[in-house]
Amino acid sequence: MRLNIKEISKIALLTAVALILFVVEAQIPAPIPVPGVKLGLANVVTLFAIFSIGRKKAVIVLLLRIVLGSLITGQVAAMGFSLAGGALCYIVMCVVRRFVTERQIWVVSVFGAIGHNLGQLAVAAFVVGTASVFLYLPILLVSGILTGLFTGLSAQYLYKHLKKLNIM
């Protein structure tokens, strides 16, 4: 894929915003004491990128955010969890994206959040060597639906208003 300066600038800008959200969220304590439960604010940027600059460029934003965010926050050991969750989330969102309109970004987000949780659980099961981590699945599904709805609606409103302003 060959990128021009304008496309590189958009990718850099979206990556910077995603990194800021990722780092800020890393400082916020988890709302419930269950591993893997978090709001996923940086996913607002990934969703926005999928809809505004396309899937191929959005995956660059996602991967840069995961790698740089893990390095910046010192969570390099958790990078495998983030990569697996992010990859499955991205794949699910790209599939669901084909079936929805710009007024249903929140749907893409909910399915993506569930995919993210499943990806992280799969890595956790591999790391600890037991499927017992899937006992967290019901809690993670509920949190994924709720956080996916919030981030999806946020991305949907952001996309709608920036499209009106003809910014992206």
Image: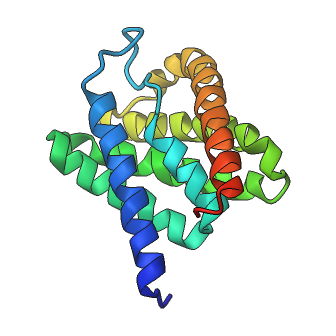
Callout count: 0
Is 153 positioned to the left or the right of 38 in the image?
Answer: right
Q: Going 49% across and 64% down the picture, which residue do you hit? A: 59
Task: Give the side of residue 166 with respect to residue 49, left or right.
Answer: right
In this view, the residue farthest toward the left is: 74
Quarter of the image for residue 14 reads bottom left
Observer-nearest of 32 and 166? 166
Quick check: 74 left or right of 88?
left
Q: Quadrant of residue 60?
A: bottom left
- Outermost residue on the front side: it is 165
Q: Residue at x 71, y 37 (%)?
A: 106
Q: Is residue 92 above or below residue 59?
A: above
Residue located 58% across and 62% down the image: 167
Identify the coloring. rainbow
Q: Position of residue 10 (x, y in %)?
A: 45, 68
- Residue 145 image point, x, y percent: 65, 25
Quadrant location, the C terminus? bottom right
Direction bottom: furthest residue: 2
Q: Nearer the viewer, residue 119 or 164?
A: 164
Q: Is residue 37 above or below residue 166?
A: above
- Nearer to us in this view, 1 or 11: 11
x, y (%) of residue 117?
52, 33
